Image: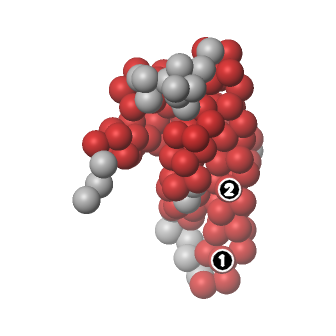
């Protein structure tokens, strides 16, 4: 059975992922693909922080500054995962298997989903922990 907190995390993450994915499409109109991924990630994590703090980890007792620092650290690790998966798929796997249909979008979508488990655990144990 899925816990209520994990369910809320998945819902909040879905909203943040949509913001991430949608803004990457817009950013791709003006900057190269890797830069668009990074900029979109910033848009996604900004919304994710606010939503997670409000709806998922509302009982966190560590100071806001510490929450923000840990949230950034956890998400930088997630960005590395997202970037690695997205770039490997787009530039190596997809061309190797002849997949050209919306390769940037598909690679980025898979890249966004990849760090869900590590992000949840990182935020639960570090970003929004309770000191009690």
**26 over 88 or under it: above or below:** above
Question: What is the residue that sits farthest to the front in this orientation?
Answer: 132
Do labels 2 and 1 touch, CB within 8 Å?
no
Marks counted in the figure total: 2
C-alpha span from label 2 to label 1:
16 Å
Q: Which residue has dot 2 on it?
A: 81
Q: Which residue is mark 1?
A: 93
Q: Is residue 19 above or below residue 77?
A: above
* Residue count near mark 1 (Cα–Cα under 10 Å), binned few <14, some 14–19, many ≥20: some
At 60% across and 20% down in the image, what residue appears? 62
Q: Camera-side residue: 76 or 27?
A: 76
Query: Is residue 104 something one can see in this rendering?
Result: no
- The answer to which of 87 and 114 lies nearer the viewer is 114
Identify the residue shown where x is 72% and y is 36%: 73
Q: Nearer the viewer, residue 96 or 124?
A: 124
Secondary structure beneath label 1: helix
Colour scheme in the image?
secondary structure
Query: Where does the image place residue 82, in percent across and percent down from the top left?
Result: 64, 53
Apparent side of residue 91 relative to residue 132 in the rendered image (left or right): right
Let me know if residue 59 appears in the view. yes
Select label 2 or label 1 by which is in front.
2
Residue lying furthest top: 64
Q: Residues within 10 Å of mark 2 (few under 14, many from 20)?
A: some
The residue at 55%/59% (across/down) is: 114
Query: Residue 11, percent across and down?
Result: 34, 41
Residue 12 occupies quadrant: top left
Q: Position of residue 7 (x, y in %)?
A: 31, 45
Query: Of callouts 2 and 1, which one flags the residue occurring earlier in the amino acid sequence?
Result: 2
């Amino acid at each position: 059975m899925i816990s209520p907190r994990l369910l809320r995390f998945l819902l909040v993450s879905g909203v943040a992922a949509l913001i991430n994915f949608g803004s990457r499409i817009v950013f791709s109109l003006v900057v190269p693909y890797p830069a668009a991924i990074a900029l979109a990630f910033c848009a996604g994590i900004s919304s994710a922080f606010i939503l997670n703090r409000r709806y998922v980890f509302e009982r966190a007792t560590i100071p806001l500054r510490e929450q923000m620092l840990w949230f950034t650290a956890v998400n930088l690790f997630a960005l590395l995962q997202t970037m690695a998966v997205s770039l490997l798929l787009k530039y190596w796997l997809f061309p190797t298997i002849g997949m050209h249909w919306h390769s940037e979008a598909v690679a980025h979508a898979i890249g966004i989903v990849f760090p869900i488990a590590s992000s949840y655990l990182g935020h639960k144990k570090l970003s929004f922990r309770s000191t009690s």
